Image: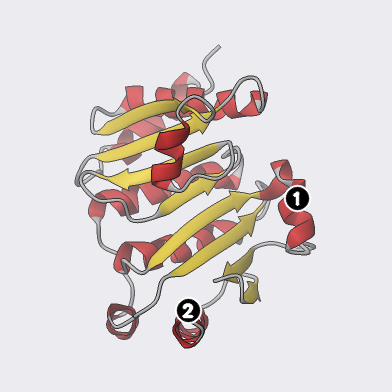
């Protein structure tokens, strides 16, 4: 049975027709160690069948470990959302159900356009970042504010080669729930040094990114 029914498929075809440039989706799964990850690979393959400019690759996390390392994928299920020729450092971890399915589609469209849509002041500030900053946005499928937080983090990654961003649907990752004391979502962790709860305004996320980059530069050996 298809994961995407005919009605939703027609809606997705209309959305995906807005692609500006091709997008590559690399899904990582392992039936033995993470059976639910196979569902993500199937979903990505069904998406690829809806739009020829979506180029889909399914990888076994164990057997294709070199590919996972190259893309910096550390856990499954995972989807790397790549531009036609550029890796913006955008990853989605978990099963994209509920609101998070829309997050995935929005990320595909944003990567296809290659334009962050951020304010000019934000673009200027990100252009002079000297140290890399990693963003993690923790979400659940029923959180209506989570897509806004994830999309903003992804757009920071599109704008700056120094920023990489993960959207993490946490229900399948209890270790992360414990590590980051996740009692509410969305929660954005910036460089593993600071945290923002809720959907942050663009200026506030920029402030935390700048501080994380400055701190990374100050402690660089």
For the residues bearing labels 2 and 1, Cβ distance under 8 angstroms:
no
Residue 30, percent across and down?
Answer: 58, 25
Residue 63, percent across and down?
Answer: 49, 24
Q: Residue at x 58, y 47 (%)?
A: 99
Classed neighbour count for the residue bearing mark 1: other residues with Cα under 10 Å, few (<14), some (14–19), many (≥20): few
Disc 2 marks which residue?
A: 209
Q: Residue at x 56, y 40 (%)?
A: 96
Nearest to the observer: residue 89 or residue 11:
89
Q: Earlier in the sequence, mark 2 or mark 1?
A: 1
Residue 158, percent across and down?
Answer: 32, 62
- Residue 16: quarter of image: top left
Q: Residue at x 52, y 82 (%)?
A: 208
- Residue 179: quarter of image: bottom right
The mark found on residue 148 in the picture is none
Drawn side of residue 75 relative to residue 117, left or right: right
As measured in the structure, the alpha-carbon distance from the residue carrying label 2 to the one carrying label 1 is 25 Å
Classed neighbour count for the residue bearing mark 2: other residues with Cα under 10 Å, few (<14), some (14–19), many (≥20): many
Q: Which structural element holds mark 1?
A: helix
Regarding residue 121, the answer to whether it shows in the image is: yes
Nearest to the observer: residue 60 or residue 156:
60
Drawn side of residue 211 relative to residue 81, left or right: right
Residue 107, percent across and down?
Answer: 40, 50
Point out the frontmost of discs 2 and 1.
Answer: 1
Regarding residue 9, the answer to whether it shows in the image is: no
Q: Is residue 44 above or below residue 158?
A: above
**Coloration of the structure image:** secondary structure
Disc 1 marks which residue?
A: 175
């Amino acid at each position: 049975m298809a994961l995407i029914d005919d009605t939703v498929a027609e809606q997705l075809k209309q959305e995906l027709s807005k692609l500006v440039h091709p997008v590559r989706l690399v899904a990582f799964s392992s039936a033995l160690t993470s059976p639910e990850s196979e569902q993500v690979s199937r979903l990505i393959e069904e998406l690829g069948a809806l739009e020829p400019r979506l180029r889909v690759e399914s990888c076994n996390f164990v057997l294709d470990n070199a590919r996972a390392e190259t893309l910096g994928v550390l856990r499954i299920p995972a989807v790397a959302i790549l531009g036609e020729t550029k890796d913006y450092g955008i990853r989605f971890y978990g099963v994209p159900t509920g609101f998070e399915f829309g997050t995935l589609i929005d990320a595909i469209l944003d990567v296809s356009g290659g334009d962050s849509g951020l304010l000019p002041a934000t673009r200027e500030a990100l252009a002079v970042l000297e140290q890399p900053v990693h963003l993690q946005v923790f979400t659940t499928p029923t959180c209506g504010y989570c897509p806004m937080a994830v999309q903003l983090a992804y757009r920071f990654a599109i704008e700056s080669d120094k920023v990489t961003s993960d959207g993490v649907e946490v229900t399948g990752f209890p270790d992360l729930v414990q590590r980051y004391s996740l009692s509410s979502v969305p929660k954005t962790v910036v460089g593993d040094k600071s945290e923002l709860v809720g959907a942050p305004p663009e200026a506030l996320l920029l402030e935390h990114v700048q501080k994380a980059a400055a701190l990374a530069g100050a402690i660089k050996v």
